[in-house]
Image: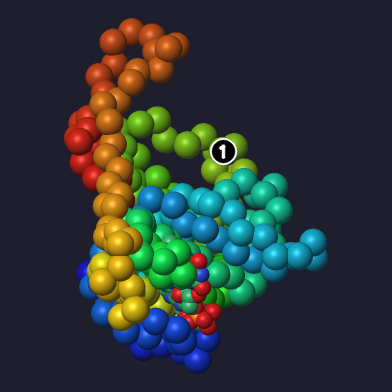
Amino acid sequence: MAADVTGPSPRTTVRRGKNRAVHDTDQVHAILAAGVVAHVGVTTDDGPIVLPMAYGVRNDEILIHGAVANAMMKAGRSLDVCITVTIIDGLVVARTPFHNSMNYRSVVVRGVATAIDDPADKMAALKVINDHIAPIWDTARAPSESDFKKTLVLAVPLDEVSAKVRGEDPIDEDIDMDGPHWAGVVPLTSTWGEAVSAADLRGTPEVPAAVADLNGTSAK
Ligand SMILES: Cc1cc2nc3c(=O)[nH]c(=O)nc-3n(C[C@H](O)[C@H](O)[C@H](O)COP(=O)(O)OP(=O)(O)OC[C@H]3O[C@@H](n4cnc5c(N)ncnc54)[C@H](O)[C@@H]3O)c2cc1C
């Protein structure tokens, strides 16, 4: 059951392109379900840093994980972070470059990241993150205690959330409409391919069904 995404807070109010702002809970969750990479931004003593990461969504929170030694993950613990998930759907080519754009679906989550320390909850959260694209957690070897200890899991509540969706033609000016220049959209689609076995694979283990099933499906 998707958690309710509340309306915009003052800092998650889309200012420009307001017509593209989405506050529909189901749509927010659909974008998060379809996305592959989260860009996680934190402020550190060194200055701001934004890193791409895997993520998962559990009811009312977005989850990320990383090495305990990861500077950004450490910095993010108990601090305000910003997590952005972006799916690009097309290149929008206008009659003049000023109006070039992209079609996209994006979600921005802002909030305080809390470390999940309870072992059972942490293990459950790791499963959610790892199963986000291909659910193989239950069929692969479980993490060792050492791996588990070396991993930090952070959760950010899906309270301050905004989404923006653009899915339309270029918006050109009247002066260009009868001109000679082309305008339109180049759709962008990514698709998972057929799984390629590791060169060092021993024996004849089968490709897990959840991995094989990705073949030909959309990697948004
Ligand atoms: C692939 C892609 C390419 C883009 N390229 C550009 C570009 O080149 N130049 C440019 O100015 N803008 C670009 N945008 C739009 C950009 O993300 C902002 O939406 C835009 O700059 C307007 O910001 P603002 O001043 O309203 O937001 P701000 O006032 O900076 O932000 C206020 C709040 O609005 C919300 N918000 C803002 N943008 C988004 C978003 N995209 N998705 C979800 N929530 C959002 C956040 O919660 C944020 O905290 C691009 C977006 C995408 C997805």
In the displayed structure, would residue 105 be above or below residue 141? Answer: below
Asked if residue 112 lies left or right of residue 105, the reply is: right
Quarter of the image where one finds residue 134:
top left
Q: Is residue 199 visible?
A: yes
Q: Which amino acid does label 1 sit on?
A: Asp
User: In front here: 81 or 166?
Assistant: 166
Q: Position of residue 166 (x, y in %)?
A: 31, 70
Asked if residue 168 lies left or right of residue 94, the reply is: left
Residue visible at 70% across and 65% down? 48
Q: Position of residue 104 (x, y in %)?
A: 34, 63
Q: Where is residue 207 in the image (x, y as percent from the top left)?
A: 26, 23
Asked if residue 207 lies left or right of residue 85, the reply is: left
Q: Can residue 121 be seen in this view?
A: no
Asked if residue 211 lies left or right of residue 156, the reply is: left
Where's the N terminus, which quadrant? bottom left
In the displayed structure, would residue 192 be above or below residue 119? Answer: above
- Disc 1: which residue: 147
User: In front here: 151 or 99?
Assistant: 99
Q: Where is residue 172 in the image (x, y as percent from the top left)?
A: 33, 74
Q: Residues within 10 Å of mark 1 (few under 14, many from 20)?
A: few
In the displayed structure, would residue 88 be above or below residue 178? Answer: above
Residue visible at 67% across and 60% down? 49
For numbered disc 1, what is the local secondary structure?
helix
